[in-house]
Amino acid sequence: MLNIVVLNVGISQQLFDVRTFSDNLFSLFNDSAADTGVTELWYAECLLVFAIGRLLQAKWDDMSKPPGDEFFHEALKRMPDLSSLRKQGVLGIELMGLSALYLQIADRKEDAYLYASSALRLSLGLSLHKSGSYRSQRRSEAVHRNRLWWSIYMQERLAAAVGFPMSISDTEITASQPTDHIGYQSAAAIAVNAKLAQITGRITTTIYSQSNQDEATFIKEVQDILQSLRKIENEMPAEISGGSNPTELILHEAPLSSSQLSSARTTASLHLTVNQNIIYAVRPILLYMARNSFSGGNDLYTSMSPALRRLADTCVEAAPKHAFLDLDCLFSTGFIFVLAVIINSDKAQAYQGIESVRSILTHLSNLGNRAATKRLAEIDQMCTSLTLETETPDVEAAQPQMLMQPFSFQASGAAPIASSEPQDQDLTSENALGEQDAVMAGAQDLGDIVLEGEDDLYWIYHNPSLSLTGVEQLDWETLENHMV
C-alpha cells in the first residue's frame, strides 16, 4: 500500500518522509528487532498511510463505509488534541495533512478543510512559511520541512477553492520553492504543484472573493493569471511536453501511455491541474452567457469581443482535457458541457460530452463509488431542469479524440466576416466573427489573448445578479434562479 500512496500522491507532494517511514515500517515488521525505536504516535501515521492506500486501491471491507475507514478511525483514536500535536512538531503536521488527504479523496470536502487548516496552522506555529526557519536544521530535515510546508499549502488552497477562506496570504510567505538536492527525489513535480496552488489562490481571491478592485487592476490580474498558467505548462520539466496529438502527452520522448506508471501519473496530474485552473478562472463567462440565454437575450456570443469569445471557447476545450483522471474534475467537465448546451443547444459536441461524463460516472457508481453516484445524480438533476433527455439512443458517449477537437459557440453555418484589424466593441454591440477569431480558435497560446481594454470582462465577473463562489453546485443553484 505504501507504493500505491507514493505513486499517486508521493511525487507531486510530500506529506511524510518516505525514507523514514520505510525504515520505521521495516523495524515494525522485523521480528528480530528487539527495540523498534518507533514512537507510539508514529503508529497513527502508519494507519493513515494504510487508510489512504486502501482508499486508492478501492478495496472495500464494508460497503457501507469508504475503503480504509477502519484504519482512519483507529488512527484518529491514537491522535491527541491539537495542543499536544503542536508539541510533536513535524509529526503533528504530517498527521493532520494525511488526515486531510484521506478526507479529500473520500469526498468529505468540509472535513478535509478543517484538517488542512489545522495542518497549516501547526506549520505556521513552526514558522515553516518563513525562510529563516530552516537555517538551524540539518539538510535532510530542512528539505523535508520545506516540501512538507508546500504540500500543506497545496492542500489548504485546494480545500479553500470549494468556498472556504484561505488562512494565509502569499505575501506573508518567504519560504523558498522546493528545489532539487543530491540524494533526494526530484522536486520538479512538487515545485510545479506549488506554483499551481498559488495560482488557485489568486483565482479565488481575485475572481470569487468579490473584492473591490478597480477595472484596470482586475483585468490585469486575470490576464496575468492566464499568462502564468500557460507559462507553467510551457516550462514543465524538459522531459515532459505536449505531442502533436492533443489527446496524447509525450514523456521522455515516448507516448505517455507507454511511460513508467509513476511518471505518467504525475505528468497527467500536473496537466490536469493546469486545465482545472483554466476552467476555474474562465467559467464565470460561461455562467454569464447561460444566464443571458435564460433571460431571452440576443446571441451574446456574437456580440462579445474576439478575446472574450476565445476565452469562452477555451473553457469548453479545457474541460475534456482533464476530465477522466479525477472525480471532481469529471463533474466539473460535466457542468461545463451542461452550460455549453444552455448557451448553444445546437452543439452536438456538448451533448456527447455530457453522455461521456455520465458514462464514466455510471461505471464508477456501479463499482460502489458513492461519490460518483452523488455526482451522477447532480448531473442528471441539471439535465432534468433543462428538460434534457439522458441516455437517448441518438446521443452516444463521444471518443476522447472527438471531445478534444477545437470548440466554438459560433452558430453552425454562420459565415465569419474577415476583419483585418481588432476593434474595441461593447458587450451589446453587433459585430462580425472576424478573421481574428479564426486565428485565435486554432492553437494560439491562451497567454497571448490580450485582455487590456476589455472592460466588459470586469462587468461579467462582477454582475450583481450573478454572485458566484467557484463551487459548481452553488453556482448552478444561482444560475437556476434565472430560469424562466
Image (tube, grey):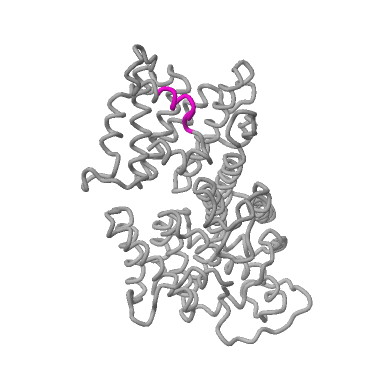
In the orientation shown, which residue stands out farthest toward the right?
420
Q: Is residue 152 left or right of residue 29?
A: right
Q: Which residues are magenta?
A: 15-24
Majority secondary structure in the magenta region:
helix
Q: In this rendering, is residue 349 above or below 7?
A: below
Q: Quadrant of residue 341?
A: bottom left
For image coordinates 67% across by 81% down, the residue present is 432
Q: In this rendering, is residue 482 above or below 280?
A: below
Closest to the observer, 9 or 442:
9
For image coordinates 33% across by 30% down, the residue present is 47
Location of residue 8 in the rendering, given as x and y in whole percent from the top left corner: 46, 44
Q: Is residue 222 visible?
A: no
Location of residue 206 in the rendering, given as x and y in whole percent from the top left corner: 58, 49
Q: Is residue 341 visible?
A: yes
Location of residue 61 in the rendering, given as x and y in whole percent from the top left corner: 23, 43
* Residue 473 painted magenta: no
In the orientation shown, which residue stands out farthest toward the front?
32
Q: Is residue 331 left or right of residue 269?
A: left
Q: In this rendering, is residue 46 above or below 65?
A: above
Closest to the observer, 268 or 167:
268
Q: Is residue 358 left or right of residue 446?
A: left
Closest to the observer, 369 or 228:
369
Quarter the N terminus occupies: top left
For image coordinates 48% across by 54% down, the residue present is 470
Q: Is residue 93 left or right of residue 188?
A: left
Location of residue 401 in the rendering, given as x and y in whole percent from the top left corner: 52, 70
Q: Quadrant of residue 92?
A: top left
* Residue 16 painted magenta: yes
Number of on-image labels: 0
Quarter the C terminus occupies: bottom left
